[in-house]
Amino acid sequence: MPTVLITGASRGLGCEFARQYAADGWKVIATCRSPGGAGALQGLSGDVDVRQMDITEAPQIDALARDLGTRPVDLLINNAAIHGPRDAGASFGALDVAAWMEVMRVNALAPLKVTEAFLPHVRAGGQRKIVFISSRAGSIAERGALPHHRPGGPYVYRSSKAALNAGAKALAFDLGPQGISVVVLHPGWVKTETGGWDAPGDAASSVTAMRKVIDAATPTDNGHFRNFDGAEIPW
C-alpha cells in the first residue's frame, strides 16, 4: 500500500487526513510536536506511525528524514500551520512584528524545509505528490474581489499564506520536470484551531473533498492552486 507523510497531525485537518488515509489502508507517517499529548492521533486505527517533528526545528526534521532511510513516501502533505494574532496585532496600524515573524516561520518557511528534507523519499515513491495546505486568504488576485471581503483583517495570516504559495509555485516549476506534482489546496473555512470554531465547515468533509483532488492529481496539475472542490483559485 502507498505511504503518506502528514505534518501537524495531532488535531484538525492533519488528524483527519491521518484517520482517512489509515482507514483506506495507507501506511501513515503522522508527525506532530508532542506525540504524548496527541490522544486523538494515538487512538487511530490502522498503520499509523506517530513521530515527533516540530517543523520549525531543523534537527528534528533531519533526524526523521535520516530515520526513514530510503523508505518511499508517495504523498507528502504539508499541513501544519498557525493563524497567529486575531486581535489588533494582526491588522495594519498595530502589527505585532514578533508574532508576524513567527507565523511566517511556521507557515511559509518550515513547509519548504520539510519538503527539502523529504524530497528523496518522495522521489522514491510511486505517486510523487507534494501537497501544501494553504488558504485562499493568501490569494493576492482575490483580495478585495470577493463579496465577503472587508477592509483590514489578518495581514499576518494572509501574508504568510501568500509567501507559502509563492514558494510552492517556485517548487512546482523546479520539480515538474522530475515528474513530481506540487498542488496547493484551500481546505475551505473549517472548524479547527486555525480556522476558528465558528467556521461553517467540518474537517471530515473538507479532507474527503481534498483527497479526491489529490487522488485525481496528475503532472498536468503541477503548480496549481485549487479549492477543496477542485476549482482553480488565482494566485
Image (cartoon, helix red, strand yellow):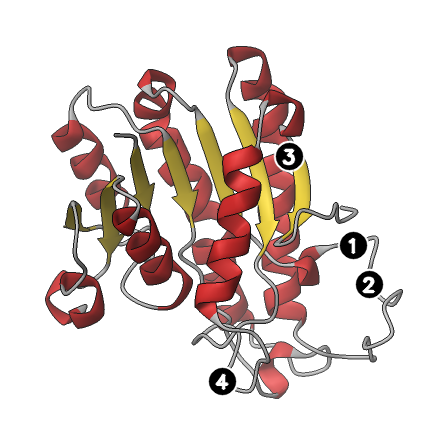
Of the residues shown, which amino acid type is indicated by label 3? Lys
Q: What element carries label 1?
A: loop
Residue at disc 2, secondary structure: loop
Alpha carbon distance from label 2 to label 3: 19 Å
Mark nearer the N terminus (3 vs 4): 3
Lateral position of residue 76 relative to residue 64, left or right? right
Q: Which mark is residue 168?
A: none
Q: Which-is-in-front pick, marks 3 and 4? A: 4
Distance in Å between CA atoms under marks 3 and 4: 30 Å
**Labels 1 & 4 near each other (Cβ < 8 A):** no
Image quadrant occupied by the N terminus:
top left
Could you tell me the amino acid type at mark 1? Ile
Question: Residue 165 location, x and y as percent?
Answer: 63, 45
Name the secondary structure under disc 3.
Answer: helix
Q: Name the residue under label 2.
A: 143
Res 169 label: 3
Find the distance from the CA under tag 4 to the CA under tag 2.
Answer: 23 Å
x and y, in percent, of residue 45 in the image: 16, 57
Question: Which residue is identified by label 4?
Answer: 197
Sequence-wise, the earlier of marks 3 and 1 is: 1
Q: CA gap, disc 1 to disc 4?
A: 25 Å
